[in-house]
Image (spheres, rainbow, N blue to C red):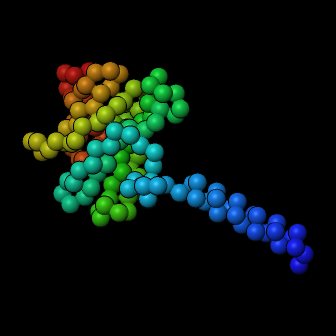
């Protein structure tokens, strides 16, 4: 092997290691493997629920992504459950509250189109719907 080939190999290995180091998250492995915001995590009946908003698809505050739910039995392995508030998918949806269990129902208080609304579901997974008389 020539000296030039050997130097090329070391150069490529150095670049590869540098790229890997740049992609490494300084905070370690993320809890939930998704780019989410406004996360509200709580344990209900032995299962962890992460209610969150998404990034708005690069349009800043002019849009928001759908309200999403992740679940975990052990707080380590999370599964994506989809949207928990289908009627709000195309709305400006921000900052879900913690879910409140009361009277055999589950309530959440997100901001939709700039106003906070109560929503109700029969299960913590949803689907949540605007409470009667609220919209």
The location of residue 55, given as percent across then percent down, is 46, 36
Q: Is residue 75 left or right of residue 36?
A: left
**Residue occupying image coordinates x 49% and y 54%:** 25
Q: In this picture, is 7 found above or below 57?
A: below
Locate residue 13: give its quadrant: bottom right
**Residue occupying image coordinates x 88% and y 69%:** 4
Total numbered badges shown on the rendered structure: 0
Q: Is residue 55 left or right of residue 125?
A: right
**Residue occupying image coordinates x 76% and y 69%:** 10
Considering depth in this image, is 133 or 63 the residue closer to the camera? 63
Q: Return the residue found at the far front.
A: 3
Q: In this picture, is 91 found above or below 70?
A: above
The location of residue 23, given as percent across then percent down, is 57, 54
Look at the image and tell me whether residue 73 can be seen.
yes
Quarter occupied by the C terminus: top left
Quarter occupied by the N terminus: bottom right
Locate residue 116: give its quadrant: top left
The location of residue 115, given as percent across then percent down, is 28, 21
Q: Return the residue found at the far right.
A: 2
Q: In this picture, is 15 found above or below 112?
A: below
Q: Return the residue found at the far left.
A: 103
Q: In this picture, is 54 found above or below 18?
A: above
Look at the image and tell me whether residue 83 can be seen.
no
Considering depth in this image, is 102 or 92 the residue closer to the camera? 92
**Residue occupying image coordinates x 44% and y 25%:** 61
């Amino acid at each position: 092997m020539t000296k030039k080939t050997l130097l090329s190999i070391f150069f490529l290995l150095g670049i590869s290691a540098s790229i890997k180091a740049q992609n490494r998250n300084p905070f370690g492995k993320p809890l939930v493997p998704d780019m989410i915001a406004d996360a509200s995590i709580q344990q209900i009946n032995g299962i962890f629920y992460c209610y969150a908003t998404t990034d708005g698809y690069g349009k800043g505050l002019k849009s928001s992504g759908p309200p999403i739910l992740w679940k975990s039995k052990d707080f380590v392995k999370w599964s994506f459950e989809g949207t928990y508030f289908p009627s709000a998918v195309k709305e400006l949806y921000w900052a879900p509250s913690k879910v409140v269990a009361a009277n055999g129902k589950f309530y959440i208080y997100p901001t939709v189109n700039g106003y906070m609304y109560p929503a109700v579901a029969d299960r913590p997974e949803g689907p949540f719907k605007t409470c009667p008389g609220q919209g």
